[in-house]
Image (spheres, rainbow, N blue to C red):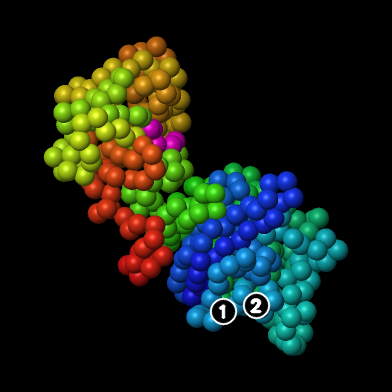
Amino acid sequence: MGTLELDNLTKIFSDPDEGEIVAVDEFNAEIKDGEFLILVGPSGCGKTTTLRCVAGLEQPTRGDILLDGESVIEKKPKARNMAMVFQNYALYPHMTARENMSFGLRMTTDLSNDEIDDRVNEAAEIMGIEDLLEKKPSELSGGQQQRVALGRAIVRDPEVFLMDEPLSNLDAKLRTQMRTELQDLQQDLGVTTVYVTHDQTEAMTMGDRIAVLNDGELQQIGSPDECYSEPANQFVAGFIGSPSMNFFDVELRDSVLMSEDFDVTISPEIEREIDGDGSEYVLGIRPEEILSEDAAEGGEDRFTIDVKVVEPLGDVTYLYADINGKEATIAVDRSTDLEPGDRISVAFPVDEIHLFDSQTGDAIINRGAPAADAFVTEDESTTEKTEA
């Protein structure tokens, strides 16, 4: 078993100039046995601090960490039955790959040399580095060093893998390859994994669930699709997805969300969920959901924009234009023949819009549906959603 629970995990650092800095604020989560959980968020949001607390490299200020129902908060790192893979690989430069992979076992276990060699050879076969075992890190490429670091974790046969941005030092092509290999490895081994990244592509493609953090606080935990389609708040909506969701300030008037450049006529279902005339909201819509050109011609809420920049990416083309004084992104088919300066019609489908509270940022409407029906609230996310 490898069920990991974080119970009100809090870490506060003291700074002589700034006083107390809350790095992790009452983080609650349950990671099931064999689950792949991604911790994602901007730099400084508390991802790595959370991982280091779980590993035992940092002592939490408050809260508890349980592995299979047993608290490990007082246990030393080597006694927690967890293996951590670091961003910088952390290989000993004077040791061969074989020696690096076996070092932890020699220091913390009573296994015989033959048993250790068997584990190293098995892990090397899994990682495809059998012919690299007698080489030192300086003789290995970045991808090979990462495989050695992963092999060192595998030989521990841990209940939990902890990975701190393990692919960030690799080039883009190798990172994509290693991403696939890591997914296959985790599924084959079935080991509970907590993976830290700031790269939302990794988060969306690798994890069973995503935990989105900001300023040390858990914003939402759910499947990649839930966080993308049913964001709990404006921060999650803006962070998950590339290009980011477009946001516009709007005001409700006579069943119409009005702004400087566009209007959106809302449905009775949406109107029942929001306040009356004069209420202000933030409207969000993703680039790929904006109707453009012919698709927008039949809509009653269509409006025109001047294209500023055309960015063809092969599989899709992005248009950039000013809407409500903000730069907006619109995704169109790659065959669309447009140039900067062209004027086109666009529309915001009412069943694709998101509405957020202008003060708190909390989601009220997700893709035209009441947000309360679309996701579990933050307080419930660590229990009900985990059990779903």
Work out whether 223 lies above or below 6.
Answer: above
Work out whether 195 lies above or below 306.
Answer: below
Q: Which residue is drawn at 26% across and 39% down?
A: 352
* Residue indicated by mark 1: 71
Work out whether 66 lies above or below 230.
Answer: below
Would you call the spot at circle 2 few (<14 residues within 10 Å), some (14-19), or many (20 or more)?
A: few
Position of the C terminus, as image quadrant, is bottom left
* Residue indicated by mark 2: 74
Q: Residue at x 56, y 79 (%)?
A: 71
Name the chief secondary structure element in magenta.
Answer: loop
Q: Residue at x 69, y 55 (%)?
A: 14
- The percent coordinates of residue 94 (x first, y second) are 86, 63
Q: In which quarter of the view is residue 63 placed?
A: bottom right
Cβ–Cβ below 8 Å for labels 2 and 1? yes
Q: Which residue is drawn at 17% across and 43% down?
A: 272
In the shown orientation, is residue 172 left or right of residue 303? right
- The percent coordinates of residue 158 (x first, y second) are 60, 76
Q: Can you name the residue that lies furthest to the right here?
A: 94
Tell which of 317 and 233 is nearer to you. 233
Read off the magenta span: 243-247
Q: In which quarter of the view is residue 10 placed?
A: bottom right
- The percent coordinates of residue 99 (x first, y second) are 79, 71
Identify the amino acid type marked 1: Ser
- The percent coordinates of residue 210 (x first, y second) are 45, 57
> CA gap, disc 2 to disc 1?
8 Å
Q: Is residue 244 found inside the magenta-colored segment of the image?
A: yes
Work out whether 354 lies above or below 62.
Answer: above
